[in-house]
Amino acid sequence: MDKLAKISYLNVKNIVRSKEMLIGIIAAYGYSMLWILFVHPPKYGLNEYGFEFSRFLYVIILYASVSILRNDIRWNTTKTIFTGIYSRVEIMVSKAISLILLGGVFYILAEINNVLATMVLFNKIGFSSFLTFNHLQLFISYISITLAMGSLMLLIVSLKFNDKKSILFYILFLSMVNFYTAAIVVLTTTKPELVETFSSYMKTPFYNVVAMSQGIITLESVVINFLWSVGFLVISFFVISKREIK
């Protein structure tokens, strides 16, 4: 298990240090700074600025999750990895561990954004707001979000199993779903009578990921995301175990 954890760590380290990832992170902070420095709506606090940051970071989460398996395909190391000393299930378990580690990385990035917002808008937000902010909730949210959407991306790559740029279509599509789902979350929170209308959609990771990004997190939403994550990962494990890897 220790060796699998080390593999997971090295996998995440390579992804985080990649040029694409670094550019994405810089762009995410640039987008966040636009809100903090120029827009800064009167009623915005750390939670709201964090949500704006998460909207851009969501795309990076999808890309990083894809890279966990796609990089093996791009670098033509799949045969070496999946036919080596570890079983395919063990390798996929290491990929799942990588998702959890990535969730921790994105949590740190979100906290850095909170620090920047607090420093730049100190007179408005104040250090006390940062201290009273629910940091544990933010940590759980990013682990849950990354695990849910990351496991879905792993499933997609397991099914496609190529390094073609068509995977960008799925990232774009899921980003659009995330964007429009934000409106549904607002409707269900401001108009309780609509909860029944969207009750089925509220059981999906797409809804709960956006809700968590907005600071709306419950035990039920965490459990829902976890169950979807397990489902996506189990199917991914099955697909990889049956796939002929050349």
Image (spheres, rainbow, N blue to C red):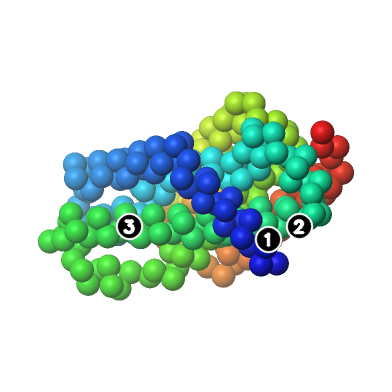
Q: Quadrant of residue 147?
A: bottom right
**Residue bearing the label numbered 3:** 112
User: Looking at the picture, which amino acid does disc 1 mark?
Assistant: Leu
Q: Quadrant of residue 202?
A: bottom right
Residue 161, horizontal then vertical, whole percent: 73, 34
How many numbered circles does the render carry? Answer: 3
User: Looking at the picture, which amino acid does disc 3 mark?
Assistant: Ile
Q: Which is nearer the N-term, disc 1 or disc 2?
A: 1
| Mark 1 residue crowding within 10 angstroms, few (<14) / some (14–19) / many (20+) | some
Q: CA distance from mark 2 to mark 3?
A: 33 Å
Look at the image and tell me whether residue 153 can be seen: no
Instruction: Give me the disc on residue 4.
Output: 1
Q: CA distance from mark 1 to mark 2?
A: 7 Å
**Above or below — where is 185 with respect to 20?**
below
Residue 243, horizontal then vertical, whole percent: 84, 40
**Residue bearing the label numbered 2:** 90
Q: Nearer the viewer, residue 62 or 35?
A: 62
Residue 34, horizontal then vertical, whole percent: 25, 41
Q: Are marks 1 and 2 in contact (CB under 8 Å)?
A: yes
Residue lying at 17% horizontally and 56% vertically, measured from the top left? 121
